[in-house]
Image: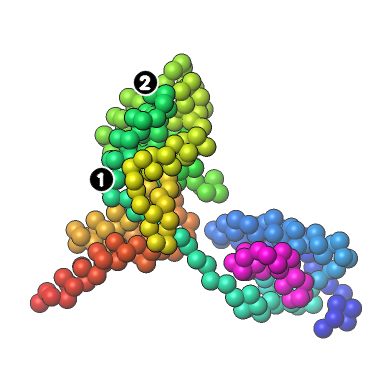
Amino acid sequence: MAESERGTMSVDLASAADAYLADCHARGYLLADHGWLIAAFLAELTTRGATMITASDALAFACRVPQSSKCWQATRLRAVAGLAGYIHDLDPEAADLIPPGLIRARRTRRLPYIYTHEQIDQLMTATTMLAPPLFALSVRVLIGLLAVTGMRSGEAFALNVDDLAVDRAVLSVTGKYDKQRLVPLHPSTVEVLAAYQEQRPGRSGPDSGLLFGPRGGRLNEKKARAAFTLLVASCGLPARPRCGSARLHDLRHSFAVHTLMDAHRDGADADARLATLATFLGHVEPANTYWYLSASPELMAAVAQRSQTSARRP
């Protein structure tokens, strides 16, 4: 039905969008990009003087940049489709229901580069080649911290001094969407971090970076990542099919995979370990943790070995 043929609508699109997003957030959905995508879509409608949402408008908005990936186009369409469905329930005259399957896109993820424990030790030892010594120390602490906590590398760079509670052996980590979690630390990790802070040049305040540079300020993320790339090359870590060269972020993947592999090899409750791991890593969606089950050949081998062992039992 053409817009001119529809009756008077009782729904203000902007107000409905605010209510829709508030309702989604109240039910636990984060919808990272939906807010600004919906605002951009409604701005386009306002510019054209349109007062309703049609499937053709939604599709045109999704495909606004033809050279963008199908996955991104599908994301743009999903944002508008959710709003359209919400408004359609309020007033069918105000929005079309967006048919599923208008844009078919399959999300692909790069396979994680899984470090062995020996490779992690090799990388940490190789930091002695970096200069000055305090920078080398900070990069070594960074690698070790990511390897034993599974934090996102960006989370580690954002840590402040007061995020470390030595007496409770925990780190307060701020993850995606400002979601906070407590990460427990092994006593040996606490000891290393405490000794590391004593090496900082000058005094530190509570908002000072936990990881510091040669002059005591926050560790420069760009320089630290460049140094890690240099370490990977110096250690001769080979690129692997479908995952490429080793990255700093892959230390997080390695932590997750080794944790699940240990659970399977020890005969522990893998499902319970997986649920705990999801919380530990700060995953918003459980699917992000389950992904490791299919993304790692090493983990699949451990699962298969446990299945064979179980099948042989009386």
- Which residue is at 39% across, 43% downward? 233
Which mark is nearer the camera, 1 or 2? 1
Distance between the alpha carbons at the discs numbered 1 and 2: 28 Å
First to last magenta residue range: 54-79
**Dominant secondary structure (helix, strand or loop) of the stretch shown in magenta:** helix
- Place of residue 118 in the rendered image (x, y in percent of width and height, measured from the top left): 25, 45
Rendered view: 25 above or below 235: below
Q: Is residue 314 magenta?
A: no
- Residue at the spot of label 2: 198
Neighbours of disc 2 within 10 Å: few (<14), some (14-19), many (20+) = few
Q: In this image, 27 relative to 299: left or right?
A: right
- Which residue is at 50% across, 34% downward? 223
Numbered badge on residue 118: 1
The quarter of the picture where residue 32 lies is bottom right
Taking the view exactly as shown, the residue that stands out farthest to the left is 314
- Place of residue 157 in the rendered image (x, y in percent of width and height, measured from the top left): 48, 37
Neighbours of disc 1 within 10 Å: few (<14), some (14-19), many (20+) = few
Compare residues 12 and 172 and report the one nearer the observer. 172
Q: Is label 1 in a helix, a strand or a loop?
A: helix
Between discs 1 and 2, the one toward the N terminus: 1
